[in-house]
């Protein structure tokens, strides 16, 4: 695993192994801002509409097909105070295909064309295509309600981070869409590619060839690196805020957000990771065993770490309308018991075993190791050696895990509940 | 015991297929470059088996029993399987589909112990009235979770529109009412009929040594009987006629969602791999992202990136469906139908056919990069009496004339159904 800064603000990471697949991604990372959150949600779709060499969507997709089914994803995401626009291409490694080296190089060139040489009409994004993509984005924003648990977490997040940009909806605002003109989007695009941090990440069997490709790619960027804003904590509320949203649904969805009120250091984050796994992250966790298996209150219930708040935890479940209060009380009781008694030595050892197994096989899957390291870059600015992370996990004690959850306070909750009379 | 090396000259790789004396099929794909393994133990018993002869006794079971049995096998006398796997560090799970049930784990440490655990809990059924009652509550919540999914509702509605009698029309998990009928005796009947070694396949890929896997299977299956009492699935006499040409319901979604589905003749036993591949190419060429149809409907606002074209098949059914969100489902469906008719008349552009064939070949090879995909596809192929490499080989050889002939035999207008979920309120209609 190697990581180099090719030019100021342009980083290349290579993870080499005996893979049959090559995966190359380029991410543009910029500060998350209210003014551009909707533009940067529409932008990836416009980039997928075509390049100078493949001047429309169909030509581009057919080119990918001809490159032995190269898969391409352009996407937007938010992490903490960062906004990410990314393009990923993956496909069978060239060594398994006729004209293999040529295919790897062509894939990389196409990826860079998608990001840096999009199809323009008179120097601007195509007006007609933009109208189409704005409407698609409006549909996507409106359709968020279709995934009820996801929608519940979205509303929860908006409340949890209401004091700053982290509350901004990842998909942008429907009301902003009409204001996105070709001129505006082109300006946002030019600002993005000229003022961001670039992360080029390769996972596959030939790092040397892709180092050369990345060096050539770096020459195509002319940018001023964007500074990254450090995560700030979500403070504790005196009284938790409870959102209740009635919907025509069969099963209520409940999500809870907790905060320590502080930004945790690396070791503390590891303690929180272990504590969340023990509390609700596995099929032998407290929530799974005691709320699902013993009380049959839920089918799905889990707890997960919230990195973006500096030190937080989310709990979510689907539950019968009549059982909501019982389930809330059961979750609260489990948290109290965990903090009071701590996990048993057996529970702790089992979670450590699970991490030994999962981290031990992380390199097997190119997508898994790529996502793991990209998340590490977003969180810490650098790579994480899975072996080092495991050593930290192994050092976590039961007392530390209990104390960590003892620092949590419920900040807010969101309940999507069944409308009366449905 | 019989054994066989299944080799791909094209990829210079191979895997092993053993059949133990008790009839269990064991597939092992060593991947020395990997650190972890992925293993599945599967039975060809899914939600569509609802009636069968066990010896000379006819057994009828309610909808959702295969899925219920999957849940219950995780709980043995005194201990559940998740606890056992927690001691090895493996990540374990299980799933039930229309035609199969699979139990699985992934791990990079204590693999042998996890493999023994997998076999032990699947071969040690323990069902009581009390544990069944507890599971009814949990599965009831799982059913209600899916009740809130429009995609799930569409899939079920389209199958109910196509099939009059075949159990594929029933939800895999059943209903709250149907699972309330389940008894320990029914679970034991299903178990004794379909969890016998002759009906099961163990598939494992990754950092494993074939002989060691074989030894463990032999040891762990030593106590497991291989009953010779005959089992025969009984299927209702489903004709080619459909049940309903149109189904509709309202849910809390923003935009309408549709599924245009066709009831097709099942793939022929001797030509299954080629026909399966042909079907994939047909769907890509008619409605994939590279198709003129996709582009036209996308630009007209009649579909978005939720659009999908897919096939669902087993020995006795084949359903092909186009589904997604659309502000005008009827118009989207009409355009799809017109494109199918055009393709039947004019055939495919040879250049596009070659691109789609290459893309399929590339994606099949990519799949062999993952231990999860390799073990899973190896097992699925075995259940269809094929090997993992058959479809890769076929993708190199398949020709356009064959695929066009297959297309002309599909998509009959009297064998289609349209299912639509519309917004209950506040939507964009």
Image: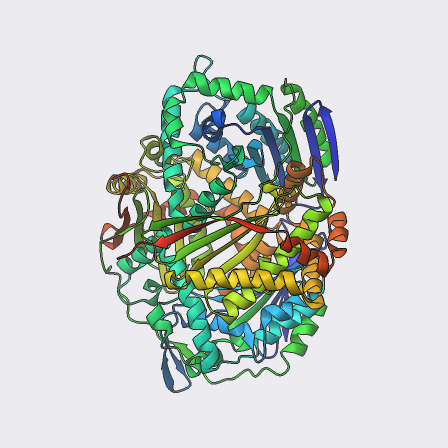
Residue A265, x across and y down, in percent:
71, 43
Instruction: Spot the residue most to the bottom.
Output: B56
Instruction: Spot the residue most to the front.
Output: A238
Q: Residue at x 52, y 35 (%)?
A: A163
Residue A410, x across and y down, in percent:
54, 51
Residue in the foreground of this view, choosing between B425 and B233:
B425
Q: Quadrant of the C terminus of chain B?
A: top left
Q: Is residue B386 above or below residue B178?
A: above
Residue in the foreground of this view, choosing between B142 and B401:
B142
Q: Is residue A109 above or below residue B157?
A: above
Residue B135 placement, left or right of A218: left
> Can I make out residue B100 in this image?
yes
Q: Quadrant of the N terminus of chain B?
A: bottom right
Residue B236, x across and y down, in percent:
30, 71
Residue B297 placement, left or right of B138: left
Q: Is residue B419 above or below residue B382?
A: above
Residue in the foreground of this view, choosing between A253 and B71:
A253
Q: Residue at x 75, y 51 (%)?
A: A392
Task: Quadrant for residue B175, please give it.
Answer: bottom left
Residue A115, x across and y down, in percent:
55, 25
Residue in the foreground of this view, choosing between A233 and B374:
A233
Task: Quadrant for residue A254, please give it.
Answer: bottom left
> Can I make out residue A285 in this image?
no
Q: How is the image coloured?
A: rainbow
């Amino acid at each position: 695993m190697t990581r180099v800064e090719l030019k100021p603000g342009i980083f290349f990471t290579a993870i080499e192994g005996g893979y049959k697949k090559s995966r190359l991604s380029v991410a543009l990372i910029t500060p998350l801002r209210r003014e551009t959150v909707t533009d940067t949600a529409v932008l990836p779709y416009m980039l997928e509409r075509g390049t100078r060499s493949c001047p429309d969507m169909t030509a581009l997709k057919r080119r990918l097909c001809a490159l032995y089914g190269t898969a391409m994803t352009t996407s937007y995401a938010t992490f903490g105070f960062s906004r990410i626009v990314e393009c990923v291409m993956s496909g069978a490694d060239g060594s398994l295909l006729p004209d293999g080296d040529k295919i790897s190089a062509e894939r990389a060139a196409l990826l860079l064309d998608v990001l840096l040489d999009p199809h323009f009409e008179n120097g601007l994004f195509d007006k007609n295509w933009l109208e189409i993509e704005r409407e698609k984005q409006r549909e996507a924003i409106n359709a968020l309600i279709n995934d009820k648990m996801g929608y519940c977490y979205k509303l929860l997040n908006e409340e949890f981070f209401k004091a700053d940009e982290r509350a901004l909806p990842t998909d942008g605002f429907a009301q902003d869409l009409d204001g996105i003109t070709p001129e505006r989007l082109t300006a946002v695009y030019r600002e993005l590619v000229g003022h961001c941090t670039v992360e080029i990440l390769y996972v596959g069997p030939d790092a040397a060839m892709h180092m050369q490709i990345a060096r050539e790619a770096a020459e195509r960027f002319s940018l001023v690196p964007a500074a990254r804003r450090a995560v700030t904590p979500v403070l504790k509320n005196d009284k938790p805020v409870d959102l209740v949203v009635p919907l025509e649904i069969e099963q209520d969805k409940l999500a809870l957000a907790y905060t320590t009120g502080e930004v945790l250091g690396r070791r503390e984050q590891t303690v929180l990771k272990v504590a969340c796994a023990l509390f609700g992250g596995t099929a032998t966790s407290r929530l799974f065993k005691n709320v699902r298996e013993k009380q049959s209150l839920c089918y799905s219930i889990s707890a997960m770490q919230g990195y973006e708040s500096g030190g937080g935890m989310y709990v979510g479940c689907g539950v019968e309308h009549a059982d909501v209060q019982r389930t809330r009380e059961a979750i609260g009781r489990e948290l109290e018991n965990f903090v009071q008694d701590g996990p048993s030595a057996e529970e702790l050892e089992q979670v450590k075993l699970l991490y030994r197994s999962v981290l031990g096989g992380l390199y097997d899957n190119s997508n898994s190791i790529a996502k793991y390291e990209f998340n590490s870059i977003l969180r810490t600015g650098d790579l994480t050696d899975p072996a080092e992370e495991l050593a930290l996990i192994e050092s976590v004690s039961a007392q530390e895990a209990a104390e960590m959850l003892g620092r949590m306070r419920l900040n807010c909750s969101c309940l999507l509940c069944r409308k009366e009379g449905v | 015991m019989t054994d066989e090396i299944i080799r791909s000259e094209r990829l210079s790789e191979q895997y092993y297929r053993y059949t133990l004396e008790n009839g269990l099929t064991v597939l092992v794909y060593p991947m020395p470059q990997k650190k972890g393994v992925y293993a599945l133990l599967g039975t060809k018993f899914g939600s569509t088996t609802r009636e069968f002869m066990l010896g000379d006794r006819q057994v009828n079971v309610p909808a959702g029993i295969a899925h219920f049995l999957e849940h219950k096998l995780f709980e043995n006398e005194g201990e559940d399987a998740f606890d056992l796997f927690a001691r090895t560090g493996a990540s374990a799970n299980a799933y039930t589909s229309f035609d199969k049930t699979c139990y699985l784990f992934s791990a990079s440490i204590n693999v042998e112990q996890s493999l023994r655990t997998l076999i032990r809990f699947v071969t040690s059924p323990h069902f009581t009235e009390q544990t069944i009652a507890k599971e009814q509550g949990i599965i009831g919540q799982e059913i209600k979770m899916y009740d809130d999914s429009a995609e799930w509702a569409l899939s079920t509605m389209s199958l109910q529109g196509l099939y009059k009698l075949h159990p594929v029309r029933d939800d895999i998990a059943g209903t709250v009412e149907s699972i309330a009928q389940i008894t320990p005796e029914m679970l034991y009947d299903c178990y004794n009929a379909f969890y016998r070694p002759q009906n099961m396949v163990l598939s494992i890929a990754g950092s494993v040594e074939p002989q060691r896997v074989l030894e463990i299977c032999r040891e762990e299956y030593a106590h497991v009987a291989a009953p010779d009492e005959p089992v025969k699935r009984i299927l209702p006499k489903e004709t080619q006629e459909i049940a309903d040409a149109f189904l509709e319901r309202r849910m809390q979604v923003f935009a309408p969602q549709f599924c245009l589905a066709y009831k097709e003749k099942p793939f022929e036993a001797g030509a299954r791999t080629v026909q399966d591949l042909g079907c994939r190419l047909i769907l890509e060429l008619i409605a994939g992202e590279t198709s003129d149809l996709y582009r036209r409907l996308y630009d007209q606002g009649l579909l978005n990136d939720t659009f999908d074209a897919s096939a669902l098949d087993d020995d006795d059914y084949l359903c092909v469906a186009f589904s997604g969100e659309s502000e005008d489902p009827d118009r989207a469906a009409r355009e799809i139908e017109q494109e199918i008719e055009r393709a039947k008349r004019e055939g495919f552009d040879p250049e596009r056919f070659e691109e789609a064939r290459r893309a399929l070949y590339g994606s099949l090879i990519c799949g062999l990069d993952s231990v999860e995909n390799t073990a899973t596809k190896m097992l699925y192929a075995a259940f269809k009496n094929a090997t993992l490499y058959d479809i890769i080989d076929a993708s190199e050889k398949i020709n356009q004339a064959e695929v066009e002939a297959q297309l002309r035999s599909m998509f009959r207008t009297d064998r289609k159904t349209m299912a639509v979920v519309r917004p209950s309120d506040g939507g964009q209609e």
